[in-house]
Amino acid sequence: MNKTIIVSNRLPVSLQLKSGKFEFKASAGGLATGLGSIYKQGENLWIGWPGNAVEDRQQQVEVADELKKLKMAPVFLSKEDIELYYEGFSNETIWPAFHYFTQYINYEDAYWEAYCAVNKKFCDAILAVAEPTDTIWVHDYQLLLLPMMLREALPDATIAFFQHIPFPSYEIIRMLPWRKQLLEGMVGADLIGFHTYDDMRHFLSAVGRILGLSNESGYIQADHRLVNVDSFPMGIDYDKFAQAALSKKTLSKKKKFKDQLGDQKLLITIDRLDYSKGIPQRIRAFDKLLEEREDFHGKVSMIMVVVPSRAKVQSYMKLKKEIDTLVGRINSKYSTLNWVPIHYFYRGFPFEELSAFYSMSDIALVTPLRDGMNLVCKEFVASKTDQDGVLILSEMAGASKELVDAILVNPNDILAVKQAIIDALTMEEAERKSRIGSMQASLRRYDIFQWVDVFMDRLTHVKQKQQEFQSKAIDKPLIEEMVGRFRNAKRPIVFLDYDGTLVGFKTNPGDAYPDQELLQIVDKLASKCEVVLISGRDKETLGKWFEKQRVEMIAEHGVWLKKSDQEDWELYANVDDGWKEDIRQVMEYYVLRTPGAFIEEKHHSLVWHYRKVESGLGDLRMRELFSHLKYMASGHNLQVLEGNMVLEIKRPDINKGRAATAFMRGTAYDFILALGDDWTDEDTFKAMPKDSYTIRVGYDYTQANYNIKNPTEVRKLLSLMVS
Ligand code: GDG
C-alpha cells in the first residue's frame, strides 16, 4: 500500500524540555490543520525538524519514539546546521533574494554547503521509511534541492513541491551563484506549486533561461519526465476563525479589551518581525495621518503585534530598533492621558486573544512589501462575522490577487496608504459590508481543505498524464517488431520530416544542413524502401541538400513534389497567392518592432520567425501577431498556425497530410512509417492508414501512435532498420 509523506523544515509541533522530559506542543497553524487530513491517515507521516538542537543520542531516540505516536518522524539538526543551513542559507540567502531584498543577500559558500548537506539529511531520513512508489510532498524554500535528491533515489515515486514564499523574477534569481542547482533540485518534482500565477510565471521563465527547458501551458519536459507547474493560492481554516470569533472565550476577551480601550476606531496589524512585511512604512503612514488630521486624535488607535523572529540576524535586529524608535516617537508626540496612538506588542498571543483582536478591529492594515500569500488578511476577513470591517491590503501580497474587494495599496506609497486609512475610516457601512461579504464568500469556498484536495487531485492528474506519455514512448520490443516488419515488407515507405526530426534546431535555419552521418542513413534507407522527405522547407534548399540521394521530396508542406527519377519539381497543389501582400505588410510591422524577427516567404505561405528574438519578447509579439493574423485570416480563408518558434499563415487546403495521401494513392504499401516533430506533421499522422507506425519526436501530445525522444534517437532507429 502506498503511503504519503509530508516533508517540511519544521514539524507541526514544538519541542520543549521541561524538567528533564520532552513535551510537544502541536501547532495550531492552518497548514498543519489542512495537512492533518493527510498525514494522520493510515501509514502516512510527516517528516521534519522538531525545532530544537537535540544532540544526545539517547534523547534523540526518546524524541523519535514520542513523535512516532503523533505520526511524525524527526530530522535532527545540529547547532551548526541550524546556524548555516537554516539561519544562514535559508534565511539570509534565499529569503531576501526571493523577497526582492537583494541588499540583504549573504553569499556564503559555507551556507551553501550546509544547505546541500542538510537537504541530504532530509533525503536520508525519508529514504529510511519510503517505499519506491510512495507519494512525497515537500514544502518550502528550505528544501529546494530535496525533490531531485529523492527523484534520483526513487525514480518512480510521486513527488510534489509547494513553495510558500514568492518566486522572484529571473533578474533576481540569476544573481545567485547556485541558481542552476536550485532550479534543478526543484524540477525533480512531478508537480511544483506556487501561490500565484506570477510566481509560477517567474519560475517557468527562470527554468527556460537557466536550464534551457521550455514549457507548454505549464508543462516542462525535464529529461523523460513531464513536470507540471501551477498556482494554488492557499486558503485558511475558515470555519475555525469564523467560529472562534463567536466563541465565549473570544467574546469575553473582546469585551475586556474594548472596555480598556474605550470608544476607539481600531486598526490591527499583525506580522512576524520581518523586513518584507513593511512595518516601518506602515507606521510612517499612520504618523502622516495623525500629523494631517487632528480630528482623528483620540479617536483612532493602532494595535500592532510584532511576533519575534530570526532575532540573531543582523538585518532583523536593525529592523527591531527602527520599529521601536518609530513607535516611541509617535507615541511620545501624540499620546494623551487617555489615548495612545500605537499599542505595540513585541510578542505572540494565544489564539483566543488573536481572534479577539481580529474581530474587535475596524480595519486591518496588511501592507507587506512582498509576501508569498499572507494569511493574516484572510484570517481578519473570516473573523468579521458581523461583516463589518475594512481590509487594506498590499498589492505585493499574493492574497491581493484573490481579495480584490480590499482597498489595495502600494505599500511603498506612504501617502496612498495614509489615504487608504482615511477611506477605510470614512467608508459607508453598506460598502464595508458588501466588500467583506464578497471576500468571505470566496475564502469560505477556497479554504485550506479545498487547497489540499485541489493540490492532491492535480498531482494524480499529472501522474496520469505522465503515464499516457510513457505508454506511448517507443520501447525495445516495439522497435524489434517494427524492424522485423520492415525487413519482411515487400513495398515499404517511410515519410520523414526534416527539421526537428532528422536534425536539431539551429539559430539560423540555413545552418541545419544534413551532415555526413545523416546522408549515409538516408542513402541506406533509400536502397531498402521508398523514402519521402516531407518538409515545410522551400524546394530550393531541400533539393540542394538531397540532390544526390535517391529520395522523393515534398516541399512547402505539399506544394511541390520531386520524384527521385525526375529532374524538376512539379506543382503538387494549386496555389493562389493574391493574399500575400496584405499579410506581409502586417508581418513587416511586427518585424520592425521585434529585433531578431524575420519573415520567410514560401510559395503558399508566409512565415514569421522569432527564434532569434530575446526570449519572452518573442512569445509576447507572437501572441499579438497571432491574434492580428487570425482576424485577417478569416477574410482571406487562410489558416494561422503556431510552430516551433514560428508563426505561419497559409492556405488550409495545403498540408502534409493531403500530400502524403496523394502520394500513396494507387500503391499498396505493406509497411508505412511516418516521423515528424510538430503540428504540421500531425496532419501526416492523421492521414496515415491504421496499421502504420506514426512517431512524434519529443514528448508533446500527439495523434501519432508513439513518441521518441529526439533526432539522435530517430537516427538510431533508422540505422537499426537498415543495419
Ligand atoms: C509564509 C509566507 C504565506 C501571527 N501572530 C500570531 C499568530 N500568527 C499567525 C497568523 C498566521 C501566521 O502566523 C502568519 O502567516 P503569514 O502567511 O502571514 O506569514 P509567514 O509566516 O511569513 O508565512 C506567507 C505562508 O507562508 C503560507 O503559505 O502566506 O506569504 O511568508 O496564520 O495567524 N498566531 C498566534 N498568535 C500570534 O501572535 N496564535
Image: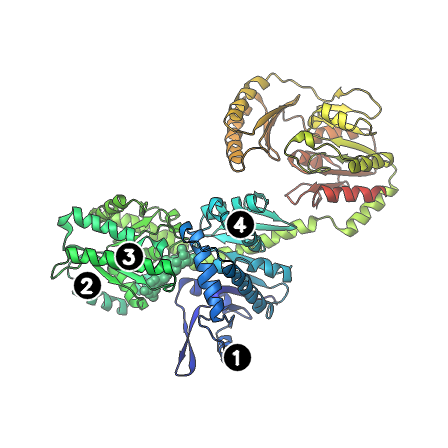
Against 574, is 139 above or below? below
- The type of residue carrying mark 1 is Arg
CB under 8 Å between discs 4 and 2? no
Which label lies toward us, 3 or 1? 3
Q: CA distance from mark 1 to mark 4?
A: 41 Å
Q: CA distance from mark 4 to mark 3?
A: 39 Å
Label 3's element?
helix
Q: Residues within 10 Å of mark 3 (few under 14, many from 20)?
A: some
Label 4's element?
strand
Q: Which residue is mark 1?
A: 57
Q: Residues within 10 Å of mark 4 (few under 14, many from 20)?
A: many
Q: Which residue is mark 4?
A: 229
Ranked by sequence position, the earlier of labels 4 and 2 is 4
Q: Nearer the viewer, residue 488 or 708?
A: 708
Residue 322's mark? 3
Q: CA distance from mark 2 to mark 3?
A: 29 Å
Q: CA distance from mark 3 to mark 1?
A: 42 Å
Answer whether residue 583 is visible to the viewer in this image: yes
Answer whether residue 341 is visible to the viewer in this image: no
- The type of residue carrying mark 3 is Glu
Residue 258's mark? 2
Instruction: Give coordinates of residue 506: x percent, y percent.
Output: 66, 35
**Within the displayed image, which quadrant is ligand 1 positioned in?**
bottom left
